[in-house]
Amino acid sequence: MAIPAVDVRRWTREAYERLVEDGYFRPDERVELVDGIIYEMSPQKSWHATAIQALREYLDPAFKEGYNLRFQMPLALSMDSEPEPDVAVVRGHWRDYRDSHPSTAVLVVEVADTTLLYDREKGAIYAQAGIQDYWILNRDGACLEVYREPQNRTYRSRTVLKPGDFVSPLAEPKASIPVGDLLP
């Protein structure tokens, strides 16, 4: 028996935003557009929410003047991708993004408690968009995966940092953040 072909409808960012504006998704429904596909995001567990608070605590002082920290808000990366990373550090003031989402970031962080493979795959769209610094806070590995040197849809550099190590964002290299303190 042959398996029938399945058509996947690819969405543009413009069409996706129209769906959002027209109320196609419930207000409590968490979705994001990645490579033209609309993905439902899993509900946040306690560890995930706590990790985001830890990131806020350490990234806020590192990125003072001239930056805006966005938590689970859209990035308009391409015509077919509008992900909502757990943390995105963008240049400018929050008022700069009243009429459109930022199209780049100096740092993107994803918290992976149940989504590690998906977050690693999302790295392709961040690399393609030229995001220089991409981190995954990995619960199961008790580590921080740091991806740098984007080239096409991949990162040429991957470093795994454990508790006891420190990380410095590329955009603020004087900041030294203890990896262990980011892991709840």
Image (spheres, helix red, strand yellow):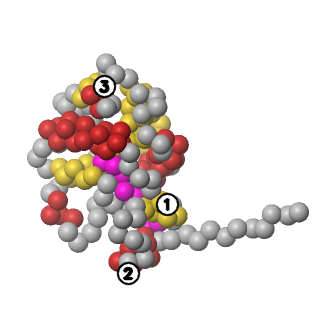
Residue 66, percent across and down?
14, 50
Q: Amino acid at mark 1?
A: Tyr
Contact check, label 2 and label 1, Cβ < 8 Å: no
Residue 156, percent across and down?
47, 36
Badge number at residue 6: none
SS for dot 2: loop
Q: Quadrant location of the C terminus?
A: top left
Q: Quadrant location of the N terminus?
A: bottom right
Question: What residue appears at the point 22 percent right and 32 percent down from the top-left corner?
Answer: 173
Q: Is residue 43 above or below residue 81?
A: above
Can residue 81 be spotted in the picture? no
Q: Amino acid at mark 2?
A: Asp
Q: Which residue is mark 2?
A: 22
Q: Outermost residue toward the front?
A: 46
Q: CA distance from mark 3 to mark 2?
A: 43 Å
Q: CA distance from mark 2 to mark 1?
A: 18 Å
Is 96 in front, or is 22?
22
In which quarter of the view is residue 3 placed?
bottom right
Q: Which residue is mark 1?
A: 39
Q: Amino acid at mark 3?
A: Gly
In which quarter of the view is residue 174 placed?
top left
Question: What residue appears at the point 59 percent right and 71 percent down from the top-left corner?
Answer: 9
Is 31 on the left-hand or right-hand side of 73? right
The image shows a total of numbered marks equal to: 3
Q: State which tag comes first along the sequence, 3 or 2.
A: 2
Q: Which residue is mark 3?
A: 180
Question: What residue appears at the point 41 percent right and 53 percent down from the top-left corner?
Answer: 43
Q: Outermost residue toward the left?
A: 65
Q: Outermost residue toward the top?
A: 164
Stretch in magenta:
77-87
SS for dot 1: strand
Question: What residue appears at the point 52 percent right and 64 percent down from the top-left corner?
Answer: 37
